[in-house]
Image (tube, grey):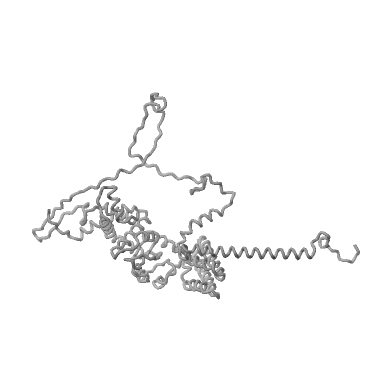
Amino acid sequence: MVSGQETIPSCLLMTSSDPTKEKILARLVSLEEEVEQLREENEQLRQENKRLRAKLRWYEGPHTPPSKEQSDQEKSSSSDGDEDDEQPRTDGGSPGRNLGHDPEWRTAPNPDQKLEVTCDCCPECGEHFDESAGVSPRLVEEVPNPQPPEVTQYNRHYYECHSCGTQTVASHPDCPDEGQFGVNVIAQSALSRYDYRLPYRKIADRFEQLHGLELSGASAWHATERAARAGRCEYEQIRQQIKDADVVHVDETGVKRDGEQAWIWTFRTEDHTLYAVRESRGHDVPVEVLGEDFPGTVVCDGWTAYPAFSSNLQRCWAHILREAEDAAEDFEDAEPIYRKLRQTYVGLQAWLETDPTTRERAQMHRSSESGLRSLVERSVADEPVATLLGKIEGGIDHWLTFVGEPAISPTNNAAENALREPVVLRKIIGTLRNERGMFVHETLLSLLATWRQQGRNPYEELKRVVKSNEMISRTHAVPAVEPSR
């Protein structure tokens, strides 16, 4: 090579095997056509996804409790693991625990009696057995046959005081002051209605089939009403406990009262649940239940009754995230809003797991609130997206309460879970007839939910409140004298 000339790398030299300009242009045209085809297919997939999500929203709206999506989330989370760790199913894909999971067994009860089951001879050849080679024990649990009702006649003697003329009827702890049915019948009627969700006619049929007790549907209703009246004192005690709580989850759903619109409210803490059936959905109901000067924090959704009742709120993040996700499916302007909200929520949840100090919580609260304020200041063209930003801005003082107070949950799942039972009953009974029905409904639902939260036996508790109510009524009232027959 001549000295003084620049050396050209061999890789840049054109060879006969290199593509020509025409081939390169043809390849570019082919790639552009392929990209355009992929864009069209991607747009078709986007439209199909939007159509399917719109169809899904027929029964999963923005205010659907997150528990309805729990099964799908669990499936997706279980499929995120490494494929090498997953073992093939050998049971045909039936539901159940994964292979290798430690089994759980029922605790074996202590037998009430032991029966020796022997055999004298071989069933095959007839040879006589001299002695047993061992014992193969088997525990069998059985309930006793239904028992007929016990009918007791209480000959209650009555007396007249010669000094003051007061007439007194002797009482017995097992003899009710009204009606002809005892504590067990009253407790089972209420439990059959509100735990087993039976119509009153079916409750009457159950008593007749199992115990031979002739009972009408109306009698089952009156027995259930007696259980509610007996438990009303404990209902008020639950209300007082909730009034004294630091954090209360509140929610409401519709219910019919004689065919007209009414509302069943739930107020839930860690250990107590209270239901209130009212014709109002306004802030007067929380005022009535919790008091005007309730000092605690209310965890709630975005219904206007809550900020009208209290300024110490925690708005539900599950609601706003679902609404933002739905908006992001239909409007491009909502996609960064949903992404920012989700990043904020997930980031805060992870950060709170580090157990920050009070000062760190306050700093994070200010920083996160500043981020939300900058989010709502953006300009959007679509009205639904502007509405979403308005909801975020309207609760700007209430989204981050949980950051500064460890005992507060960022979602209202507790109250939504508490409304499941009333919603199921609403589908069964249709409507409450009158004030008495509303009274029974809210009282027994509250008692049973609270007892379940506290791990108490609802049947035993119902018998307890009915019997204690009988004792209280005897203490504060003089029974009327019935003439002998």
Residue 124 showing in the rendered view? yes
Q: Nearer the viewer, residue 409 or 479?
A: 479
Rendered location of residue 295, percent (x, y): 38, 69
Rendered location of residue 235, percent (x, y): 31, 61
Q: Is residue 462 left or right of residue 15?
A: left
Q: Residue at x 31, y 66 (%)?
A: 258
Rendered location of residue 80, percent (x, y): 56, 54
In terms of image quadrants, where is residue 476? bottom left
Q: Residue furthest left?
A: 162
Q: Is residue 404 left or right of residue 81?
A: left
Rendered location of residue 432, percent (x, y): 32, 63
Q: Nearer the viewer, residue 339 or 52?
A: 52
Residue 402 showing in the rendered view? no
Picture mark count: 0
102 to 377, vertically: above or below = above
182 to 350, vertically: above or below = above
Q: Nearer the viewer, residue 198 or 245?
A: 198
Which part of the image, by quadrant, shows the N terminus?
bottom right
In terms of image quadrants, where is residue 288? bottom left
Q: Residue at x 29, y 47 (%)?
A: 210
In terms of image quadrants, where is residue 246? bottom left
Q: Residue at x 37, y 55 (%)?
A: 452
